Structures are given as structure tokens and as C-alpha cells.
């Protein structure tokens, strides 16, 4: 028995016949004998059991597009009698999903479209089993289904589109870029993956190598300044470029990079520039530009002044972009000396290409004419600064220095001089306004001010805005005009146990003067103390002197204080001298010379006066001082007189009525006779209102008859006398408040220009009152206008 494998006709037409080895199957293996019998028979025969089928691989074309499943092949076992007792099993890659097998007939089909570029082969395993017992009739065998390639993929440029750069002016054949197209078909089978390159667009500038895909320059001397960018179209075709092959395309954007192939050229052959003569050094005059068609470093320039009468006056440099030349002032300008300059300027490239030197020279020359503009300049001093030395004993009015300044302009205006007072606040100096003579107006003292830094101003008369200044430094030189004097120690002591010749003090002197050779002092006792029996002086010749004792046996009981006059002189001319008195006290000292006491009264103190007693005395003095301060404080806060109780809070005399008054014509509300005749103020004969009593009584008091009699005659005299009487009463009464008697009314009377504002009689009229006119009466009636009148639309609400 054997296994037959039937291949489809399509496979046979493309492939070599597949030879399948048919192996003989042992009947015992197929029938499934018992284990003992098999072992016995195996041991007896010693034969190797062979498999019933063996095959290696199937071949099938990819991209099948039929409607029916693609037939791969047929599996058949010699033990298959066609009765359906054998079942074929297929396992492995794609079994059940990509490949299926008819378990009865063994036919293998592909149920999905196969693509070699996705998967080129499948490994499957087949086995024949007993359908009833599911026992394997043969061991499982493995076979391979290989997918055979067809030309179904065009070449592709995976990195396109491409960007490339090539220098301008490149030679023919210069490599630009290499392109590579990838074909997914099988390169080992046929020409499906054999790619050939060609250029579709971009001639005659570029070409491409058919085999390598290298793009090269095919036109010489391509100029970037004429055309910078190129776009070419490259095609890659498989099947060796034959008819029917698949093709893919890509674009290559090629940019010509710049090289220094163009010389610079100035846009002007002559530049005209101007600059004011007052321009400081470093000021920019103007800029020039040598244009270069190249870009980047190939257009960078370097400028230089190669000739002209302004080579030393002006300078030129390149700006930050290295393109423009900046002309600047190198030296101060003066219109009056030279009004114009001529410069010859050269501009050259800084980066040259040795291969293109034949296209040079890469430089150009231009002329720059600079005109200096006249400016009204401030006066110019003959020196930038002045230094003067002056003795401090110079007389007032001494001419220190004569400064001079001139107008540098052609007009040569007159110059006037002055001193900046902020530089000489003490006014030690004065300058003559026309001549510039600087002189002293106060005495100088080096010990007070050693230096004077004066600022002198020069101003043009015709143009006061033109002012110049110069610094004048005056150094005050020293003159020996101060006597020396003892320093620090003007008092010392001598111990009671001091012996003759003992040093008790070293004295030194100071002098505010500063002689050039240094200080030198001479010491001696004053003539009146030359023969002093107690002390002597020794000059050490080093600007110091010693005070020594001449005797011993000092006692505080004999004398406690000695005064020693010391004569000091300096060594300069004129010599300055002084006499200082040294006070010497006699003190009690211990054996080591330390002072114990210098007061003779200390020995007469009672022995019973201890420290506790001293503290008690001090405490009593302190208490006494506190009591004195307390008494002084109480006296300063004496009780002041108070106002009378009944008049303490009375500020004004107010009489209020609830009825409308009649203004000046009303005689009922208040009896004016009280003002004319003060004697009748409290008499019941006057006209008194009966309808209402005043809320408070008037502050007007009864004035006795003698106070007003004889003051005057007539009505005016009565009023005048009343006022004087009230004034006298207030002056004599310490409790009377200094307030006037005031009568007030709550309403305006009929005699007022505003007429009556009362609402007491408004009930007699049925008409509505209009108070809008209150707005026209000014600020005094503003409150009434807000209460009764109509508010304006722009007036904010009050509540």
C-alpha cells in the first residue's frame, strides 16, 4: 500500500514534477495488533518499521484572485479503501484559517489570499487517523507550502522626496545624491526585483545612473545667482526596465549652494557725507556698502582707508553683519582749520575660493568726501587744567593766576569769566570778569583748608549758552604761623616718697604746621622758673622732655599742688614759641609708686564716718529734691476760677418764637424800646408778648441808672451808653462769659426780599406752592432748595 499526492494542474504547469516516495506499510501496524504480539514478532524478525507516506513541500502562486478556494494538493493513503474509515488531520501554520483539508478525501485548499511579501512559506503537519477509534494510523508528518512570487510590487523610494545641495559652478559629473528604490518582490526569482533608474524631469541640468541611482551634474557652470533651486523627477522600474515592468517615482529638490564667484561692487563711486565739528571722537559719520551678489560668508567685507587727506582724522570699521563699512571720527575736528576731507576707501572679500581666483579681483574702491559743518563752539581754555601753589600768608588781593580762553569760531566773540560758586562756597577767590585774573579776597589758612579746587567758567558775550569750564587746583603752602604747645598731659603727680632726680613725667609738643624738614621742638623752663628748687626739665633732643625732681621729702601737709611753666619753641623761621603750665600734685603712694590719695583733707575726716553714713546723707538729699520738685509741680497746676453755674453753658441769648415775624416792621415779637432805654428792660410797661414766653431768659441784665446817665443825649446816646454799661459789667464780673446777647428769629418777615417762607398761612390757599426758584438764590438757600425745590436730573439723591 502507498500514499498518493495529487497536485493541481496549475502547479504542474509551473513546477517540476514532484516525486513522492511510496513506502510500504506493515499490515500489523495498520491493524493495531496487541503489544505482546508485536514485541515478539519484532524481536524475531528484527525488521525496521517504515512510514506509509513522506513528502517535502508544495508550491503555490501568490495573489490568487479566483472565487473558489485555491486547490493546493491531495493527500491519499494506501490504506484508504474509500469507505470513509480514515480521517485526515491538518495542523500547523495557517491550518484551519488559511488552509483547510477535506478529512475524507484529503484535498487541501487555500481559503485566504496568499501574499509572499507577507509570508513566504507555511509549515504544516498531516496525519491519518481511524475515524472510529481516532487512533493514528501513521506517525504525524511535516511538509512545507511555499508561496511562489509574481511581479506584484513596484519599486518604492522609502526616503523620498529628497533634498540635496551641490555647489554652484560644479563640473559635469559631480555627484549630487544617491537614490535607492526598494522592490518587495523576490530578488532570487526572475526579474521582478531588478530595478533600473531613469530621469523623467530635470534635463539637461542633471542625470542619473541607471544601475546605481547616483544623481550627477550634467550641465557645467550653473550659477546660483541666476537660478538657485531645481526639482527633478527620478523613476525606478523593475523587470530590468522591460515593457510590462512596474515603476515608482520620486522628486529630488536640489539647491545650488553659494561660492565666492562674484566680486563686490560699490553702489556709488562718490559718497558725500557731513559731520559737525563738535562731534566727539568715535562719532559715526556715515556708512558705505560694497554690494556682493554672493551670500553668507562669501559676501562678508573688510573696509580700509587706503588714501586721502583724512586717513589720520577718520577711521572705518565693519559693522556686526560684516557687510557695511562704518566711518567714524578718529581725531577732534575744527571747521576753522580744515572744513573738508577726502577718503579713498577699499572694500574686499574676506573669504576667497582659490579655485575661482581667476574670476577676481574680489575688491572695489570708492571715494568718500566728508564736509565739516561749522558749530558755535564754547570758549576754549589755553590749558585743560591749572595747578597753582600759594603761600598761606599771601595778602588779600594777591593775583593767583590769570586764565585765558578764546572763542574758537571765526566770529571770535568776547569772553567773560566767572567762578562756579559751588566750587568756592566760602568765597576765598575772585576772578576779574574781563581779564581772567584769579585773586584772593580772604586770608588763607593751610591748617583749615589745604586745597582749593575751583571751577572757572568762560562764557561768550553774544551767546550766553556757550559756556566752558576749567579746573584750577590751588595748593596752600605752609608758613610757620602756629606756635607749638604741650599735648595730652598738662597734669601729673609726685609721690611723697619721691627722691631727688626721679622722673615724674615725659612731655611732648604738637604744632599744626608742617615744615618740609619735619618738626623740631626745644624745651626749657620759663625764665621765672629757671631756678625752681623743686623740679627741673631735661630736653631729650628728640622732641620730648623729662620733668625731674630736685629734692625729696614731699608732704601734702606742706603743699599739695605745684605749677611748673614750660617754654616750648620750634625750629622754623619765624620762630614760634609758647608757654604751658604743668600742674603737679603731691600724692600718697605705696611702695610700688601707685597713687593712694592726693587730697590733704582726707586725713582730717572723722574715723566714725563710714560708708553707711555717706549713703544715708545722699538718700536724705535725694528725698529733699523730690519734695521740692513736687511742690513746684503743684504750684504750676493751681486751680483756675470756674464760670458761674447758671452761666457755665450759656453761649448765646436765644429767644424763639413759633409765629411768623414781620422782619424790621415787626414790633410785637421784640420790644425795640429795650435797646433804646435799658432802664425799662424789666418794667412791665413795655409791650410784652402774651401768647408765648421765651424758652430762656435774656442774658441782658438790669443796669443801674447811674451807669447810663450822662453818657449822651438822644436815642443814639442811650444805645451807646447801654453798650458801654454792659461792657463795664462784663469786665467787672469774673464769672460773666465773654459772649454777646443775640436775638434770633426762626422765620423771615414780610419785609425780606425772599418774602415769607413760613407754611403757617399756607392753609388759606388751595394752590400748590412752587419752590423751584430757590435754586436761583445761590448757595445760602441750597439746603431749602434741596428740601422743597425740584432736584436737577444730574443731582445725586440725598438718601
Image (cartoon, rainbow, N blue to C red):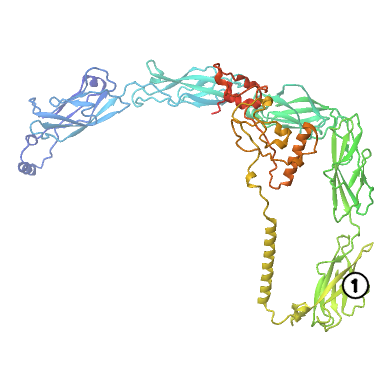
Name the residue at the bottom extreme: 553
Q: Position of residue 219 (x, y in %)?
A: 57, 19
Residue linked to disc 1: 524
The quadrant holding residue 104 is top left
Question: Where 510 falls versus 548 (above or below)?
Answer: above
The quadrant holding residue 156 is top left
Secondary structure beneath dot 1 equals strand
Answer left or right for 183 relative to 595: left
Q: Residue at x 39, y 15 (%)?
A: 243
Q: Position of residue 466 (x, y in %)?
A: 85, 33
The residue nearer to you, when weighing 622 against 134, is 622
Q: How many tags in the picture? A: 1
Question: Where 534 falls versus 245 (above or below)?
Answer: below
Question: Where 69 falls versus 448 (above or below)?
Answer: above
The residue nearer to you, when weighing 464 against 190, is 464
Q: Position of residue 191 (x, y in %)?
A: 36, 22
Amino acid at each position: 500500500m502507498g500514499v498518493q499526492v495529487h497536485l493541481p494542474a496549475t502547479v504542474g504547469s509551473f513546477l517540476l514534477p514532484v516525486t513522492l516516495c511510496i513506502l510500504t506499510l506493515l499490515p500489523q501496524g495498520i491493524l493495531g495488533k496487541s503489544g505482546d504480539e508485536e514485541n515478539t514478532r519484532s524481536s524475531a524478525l528484527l525488521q525496521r518499521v517504515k512510514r506509509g507516506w513522506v513528502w517535502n513541500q508544495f508550491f503555490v502562486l501568490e495573489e490568487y484572485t479566483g472565487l473558489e478556494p485555491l486547490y493546493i494538493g491531495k493527500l491519499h493513503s494506501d490504506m484508504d479503501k474509500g469507505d470513509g474509515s480514515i480521517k485526515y488531520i491538518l495542523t500547523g501554520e495557517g491550518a484551519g484559517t488559511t488552509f483547510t483539508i477535506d478529512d475524507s478525501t484529503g484535498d487541501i485548499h487555500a481559503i485566504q489570499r496568499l501574499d509572499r511579501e507577507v509570508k513566504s512559506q507555511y509549515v504544516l503537519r498531516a496525519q491519518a487517523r481511524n475515524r472510529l477509534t481516532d487512533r493514528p494510523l501513521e506517525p504525524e508528518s511535516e511538509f512545507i507550502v511555499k508561496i511562489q512570487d509574481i511581479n506584484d510590487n513596484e519599486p518604492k523610494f522609502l526616503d523620498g522626496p529628497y533634498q540635496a545641495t551641490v555647489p554652484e559652478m560644479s563640473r559635469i559629473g559631480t555627484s549630487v545624491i544617491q537614490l535607492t528604490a526598494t522592490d518587495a518582490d523576490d530578488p532570487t526569482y526572475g526579474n521582478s526585483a531588478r530595478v533600473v533608474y531613469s530621469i523623467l524631469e530635470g534635463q539637461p541640468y542633471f542625470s542619473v545612473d541607471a544601475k546605481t541611482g547616483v544623481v550627477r551634474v550634467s550641465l557645467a557652470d550653473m550659477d546660483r545667482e541666476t537660478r538657485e533651486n531645481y526639482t527633478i523627477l527620478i523613476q525606478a522600474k523593475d523587470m530590468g526596465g522591460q515593457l510590462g515592468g512596474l515603476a515608482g517615482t520620486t522628486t529630488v529638490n536640489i539647491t545650488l549652494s553659494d561660492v565666492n564667484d562674484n566680486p563686490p561692487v560699490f553702489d556709488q563711486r562718490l559718497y558725500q557725507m557731513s559731520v559737525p565739528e563738535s562731534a566727539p571722537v568715535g562719532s559715526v559719520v556715515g556708512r558705505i556698502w560694497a554690494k556682493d551678489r554672493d551670500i553668507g560668508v562669501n559676501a562678508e567685507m573688510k573696509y580700509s582707508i587706503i588714501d586721502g587727506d583724512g586717513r589720520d582724522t577718520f577711521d572705518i570699521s565693519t559693522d556686526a553683519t560684516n557687510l557695511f563699512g562704518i566711518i567714524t571720527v578718529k581725531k577732534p575736528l575744527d571747521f576753522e582749520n580744515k572744513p573738508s576731507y577726502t577718503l579713498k576707501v577699499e572694500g574686499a572679500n574676506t573669504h576667497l575660493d582659490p579655485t575661482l581666483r581667476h574670476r577676481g579681483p574680489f575688491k572695489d574702491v570708492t571715494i568718500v568726501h566728508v564736509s565739516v559743518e561749522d558749530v558755535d563752539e564754547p570758549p576754549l581754555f589755553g590749558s585743560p587744567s591749572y595747578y597753582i601753589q600759594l603761600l598761606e600768608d599771601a595778602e588779600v588781593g594777591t593775583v593767583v593766576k590769570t586764565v585765558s580762553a578764546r572763542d574758537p569760531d571765526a566770529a571770535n566773540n568776547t569772553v567773560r569769566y566767572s567762578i562756579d560758586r559751588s566750587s568756592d562756597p566760602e568765597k576765598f577767590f575772585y576772578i576779574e570778569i574781563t581779564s581772567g585774573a584769579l585773586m584772593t579776597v580772604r586770608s588763607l589758612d593751610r591748617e583749615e583748608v589745604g586745597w582749593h579746587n575751583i571751577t572757572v567758567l568762560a562764557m561768550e558775550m553774544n551767546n550766553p549758552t556757550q559756556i566752558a569750564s576749567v579746573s584750577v587746583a590751588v595748593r596752600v603752602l605752609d608758613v610757620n604761623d602756629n606756635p607749638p604747645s604741650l599735648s595730652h598731659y598738662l597734669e601729673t603727680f609726685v609721690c611723697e616718697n619721691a627722691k631727688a632726680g626721679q622722673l615724674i613725667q615725659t612731655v611732648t609738643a604738637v604744632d599744626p604746621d608742617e615744615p618740609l624738614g619735619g618738626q623740631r621742638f626745644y624745651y626749657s623752663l620759663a625764665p621765672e622758673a629757671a631756678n625752681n628748687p623743686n623740679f627741673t626739665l631735661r630736653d631729650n633732643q628728640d622732641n620730648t622732655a623729662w620733668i625731674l625732681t630736685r629734692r625729696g621729702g614731699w608732704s601734702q601737709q606742706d603743699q599739695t599742688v605745684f605749677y611748673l611753666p614750660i617754654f616750648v619753641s620750634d625750629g622754623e623761621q619765624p620762630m614760634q614759641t609758647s608757654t604751658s603750665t604743668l600742674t603737679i600734685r603731691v600724692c600718697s603712694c605705696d611702695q610700688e609708686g601707685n597713687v593712694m590719695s592726693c587730697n590733704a583733707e582726707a586725713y582730717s575726716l572723722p574715723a566714725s564716718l563710714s560708708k553707711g553714713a555717706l549713703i544715708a546723707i545722699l538718700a536724705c538729699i535725694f528725698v529733699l529734691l523730690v519734695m521740692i520738685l513736687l511742690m513746684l509741680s503743684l504750684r504750676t497746676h493751681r486751680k483756675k476760677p470756674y464760670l458761674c453755674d447758671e452761666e457755665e453753658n450759656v453761649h448765646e441769648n436765644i429767644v424763639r418764637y413759633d409765629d411768623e415775624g414781620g422782619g424790621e416792621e415787626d414790633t410785637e415779637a421784640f420790644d425795640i424800646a429795650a435797646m433804646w432805654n435799658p432802664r425799662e428792660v424789666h418794667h412791665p410797661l413795655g409791650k410784652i408778648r402774651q401768647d408765648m414766653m421765651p424758652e430762656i431768659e435774656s442774658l441782658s441784665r438790669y443796669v443801674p441808672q447811674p451807669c447810663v446817665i450822662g453818657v449822651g443825649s438822644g436815642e443814639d446816646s442811650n444805645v451807646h451808653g447801654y453798650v458801654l454799661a454792659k461792657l463795664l459789667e462784663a469786665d467787672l464780673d469774673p464769672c460773666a462769659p465773654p459772649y454777646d446777647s443775640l436775638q434770633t428769629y426762626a422765620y423771615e418777615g414780610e419785609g425780606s426780599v425772599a418774602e415769607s417762607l413760613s407754611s403757617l398761612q399756607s392753609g388759606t390757599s388751595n394752590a400748590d406752592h412752587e419752590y423751584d426758584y430757590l435754586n436761583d438764590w445761590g448757595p445760602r438757600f441750597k439746603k431749602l432748595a434741596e428740601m422743597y425745590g425740584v432736584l436737577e436730573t444730574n443731582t445725586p439723591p440725598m438718601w
